[in-house]
Image: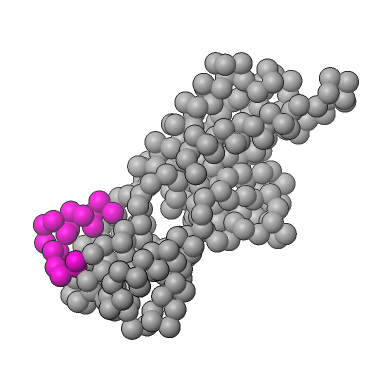
């Protein structure tokens, strides 16, 4: 699903929510009025995942377009997007500000698995929608336990099951090396890969290397994977580390890998 389609869907949903007959009693939740809809958002405009900040800027531009065309049933969208630096404690601070001070109607597309995990219980306790979270972690599919949280992109486990199926079909004797972020984001992908490979996973995955978001480089992890004899590389990283991996490969870490199944740094994720 494209970002544009997601934003259109969100605008349509908001339009329906405010399409009550004129004679109905006007009673809105905080963040909504006859003239305004306040929408909160957190994005990593700085920090290790700052490449994703472009997504927040795109969303702001789209909502400006909606406002320039008259808004939603005459209501202008006040899109308040704050920088959390891809740091869960900072996300908590920013989201508390959005909910308790700015009194937004909802938090739309906050980005990052660790960031959204940090605010998950808070949003559901406050009963403020955590809408279309920008992460594919499996945990967002829990409408009974956490009804105020909604994901939107295909979940990570499903994605790597598809990669696993491709490997089994095209390179059934692969020796797989995996680089992954050491949190729910990376572990979700890794689980999907192993589930997709089934009983062949233990034999085919010859090396796993994890990294922390705070790590300056992943050079040592790449050297480890290169030394394992892997000929298929699964790259489960956010943009900063994907770039570091490419630099390392070009300069010092070139090896026997003949095929790479790289989790793309596209759209919304992390």
The x and y percentages for residue 185 are 45, 60
Task: Specify the farthest residue to the left.
Answer: 251
115 to 180, vertically: above or below: above
The residue under the point 45% across, 46% down is: 268
The x and y percentages for residue 142 are 66, 59
Colouring scheme, one of rainbow, by chain, secondary structure, one colour: one colour
Residue 182 visible within the image: no
Residue 169 placement, left or right of 87: left
Front one among 166 and 228: 166
In which quarter of the view is residue 245 placed?
Answer: bottom left
Front one among 205 and 161: 161
The residue under the point 43% across, 83% down is: 199
The answer to if 250 sits in the magenta stretch is yes
Q: Which residues are magenta?
A: 242-258
83 to 235, vertically: above or below: above
Residue 63 placement, left or right of 270: right
Task: Specify the farthest residue to the front.
Answer: 169
The x and y percentages for residue 228 are 21, 77
In which quarter of the view is residue 63 placed?
Answer: top right
The residue under the point 46% across, 35% down is: 56
The x and y percentages for residue 250 are 13, 56
Residue 135 visible within the image: yes
The answer to if 232 sits in the magenta stretch is no
244 to 26, vertically: above or below: below
The total number of labels drawn is 0
């Amino acid at each position: 699903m494209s970002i544009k389609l997601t934003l259109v869907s969100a605008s349509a949903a908001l339009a329906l929510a405010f399409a009550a007959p004129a004679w109905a009693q006007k009673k809105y939740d905080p963040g909504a009025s006859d003239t305004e809809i306040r929408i909160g958002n957190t994005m990593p405009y700085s920090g290790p995942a700052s490449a994703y900040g472009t997504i927040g800027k795109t969303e702001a531009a789209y909502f400006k377009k909606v406002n320039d065309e008259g808004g939603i049933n005459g209501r202008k969208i006040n899109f308040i997007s704050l920088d959390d630096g891809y740091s869960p404690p900072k996300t908590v601070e920013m989201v508390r500000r959005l909910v308790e001070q700015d009194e937004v109607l909802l938090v739309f597309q906050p980005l990052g698995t660790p960031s959204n995990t940090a605010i998950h219980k808070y949003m559901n306790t406050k009963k403020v929608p955590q809408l279309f979270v920008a992460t594919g972690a499996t945990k967002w599919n829990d409408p009974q336990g956490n009804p105020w949280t909604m994901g939107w992109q295909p979940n990570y486990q499903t994605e790597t099951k598809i990669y696993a199926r491709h490997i089994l079909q095209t390179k059934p004797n692969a020796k797989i090396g995996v680089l992954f972020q050491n949190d729910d984001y990376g572990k979700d992908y890794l689980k999907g890969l192993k589930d997709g490979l089934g009983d062949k996973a233990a034999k085919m995955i010859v090396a796993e290397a994890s990294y922390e978001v705070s790590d300056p480089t992943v050079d040592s992890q790449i050297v480890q994977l290169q030394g394992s004899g892997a000929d298929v590389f699964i790259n489960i990283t956010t943009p900063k580390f994907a770039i570091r991996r490419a630099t390392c490969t070009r300069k010092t870490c070139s090896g026997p890998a003949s095929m790479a199944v790289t989790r793309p740094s596209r759209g919304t994720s992390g």
